[in-house]
Image: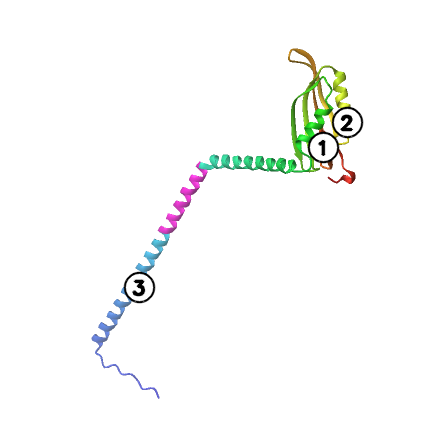
């Protein structure tokens, strides 16, 4: 059984209590609005600060972009040179010493043919030495003789006379030439200054 609630407060007192409650509710709402406004302001300020920092970082990156690109290009070139040096180093560790290649070619030189320069590189595919020689010959006859010796050697492949022209060397008229060839990795040293292809292609 629900008992009825009887309010014995006078009407004026009841109005005063209700007015006080309304004031408290308004004050509470005001405090909540103030806290909410402060939170929104703090969040907006923090977002604006982060955005400004990101803008400054972006501007700095844009300003330093040329320097960064040059640094990256320099590192890429250094890496390429290092890889090339490592390939050459690995190639020189094979069973074909560079000195043996030089000695074999030197032993094939006719009396009046002189080498003035030589470049040796290592090719990965197929794995072989690439040799480019520059030299001079007293006559074209000695040059043809040298070329035939290189072609007839089983240790060399792809012998090519890429350039031959008249020139002057130490005050004398000579025939300047450029010859290129390949040395497969399946050759072996027979004796100092000579090489041949190994049986079965094995070192």
Residue 77, given in percent of the width and then of the height, sits at: 55, 35
Residue located beneath label 1 in the image:
183
Residue located beneath label 3 in the image:
29
Q: Residue furthest bottom?
A: 1
Element under disc 2: helix
Residue 43, given in percent of the width and then of the height, sits at: 37, 54
| Mark 1 to mark 2 CA distance (whole Å) | 12 Å
Residue 126, given in percent of the width and then of the height, sits at: 71, 37
Q: Residues within 10 Å of mark 1 (few under 14, many from 20)?
A: many
Magenta stretch in the rendered image: 45-63
Sequence-wise, the earlier of marks 1 and 2 is 2
Sequence-wise, the earlier of marks 3 and 1 is 3
Element under disc 3: helix
Tell me the colour scheme of the image. Answer: rainbow
In depth, the one of 16 and 167 nearer the eye is 167
Q: Are marks 2 and 3 in contact (CB under 8 Å)?
A: no
Quadrant of the rendering where the N terminus is positioned: bottom left
Q: Residue at position x 77%, y 24% from top?
A: 149
Q: Residue furthest front?
A: 191
Q: Residue at position x 29%, y 65% from top?
A: 28
Quadrant of the rendering where the C terminus is positioned: top right
76 over 147 or under it: above or below: below
Residue located beneath label 2 in the image:
151
């Amino acid at each position: 059984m629900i008992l009825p609630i009887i309010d014995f407060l006078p009407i004026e007192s009841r109005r005063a209590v209700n007015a006080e409650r309304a004031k408290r509710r308004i004050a509470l709402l005001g405090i909540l609005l103030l806290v909410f406004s402060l939170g929104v302001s703090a969040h907006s300020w923090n977002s604006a600060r982060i955005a400004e920092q990101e803008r400054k970082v972006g501007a700095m990156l844009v300003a330093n972009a040329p320097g960064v690109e040059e640094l990256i290009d320099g590192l890429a070139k250094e890496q390429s040179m290092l890889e090339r040096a490592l390939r050459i180093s690995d190639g020189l560790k094979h069973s074909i010493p560079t000195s043996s290649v030089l000695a074999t070619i030197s032993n094939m030189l006719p009396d009046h043919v002189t080498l003035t320069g030589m470049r040796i590189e290592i090719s990965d595919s197929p794995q072989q030495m690439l040799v480019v020689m520059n030299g001079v010959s007293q006559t074209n006859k000695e040059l043809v003789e040298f070329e035939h010796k290189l072609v007839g050697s089983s240790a060399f492949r792809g012998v090519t006379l890429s350039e031959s022209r008249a020139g002057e060397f130490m005050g004398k008229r000579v025939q300047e030439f450029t010859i290129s060839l390949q040395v497969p990795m399946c050759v072996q040293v027979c004796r100092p200054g000579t090489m041949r292809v190994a049986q079965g292609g094995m070192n």
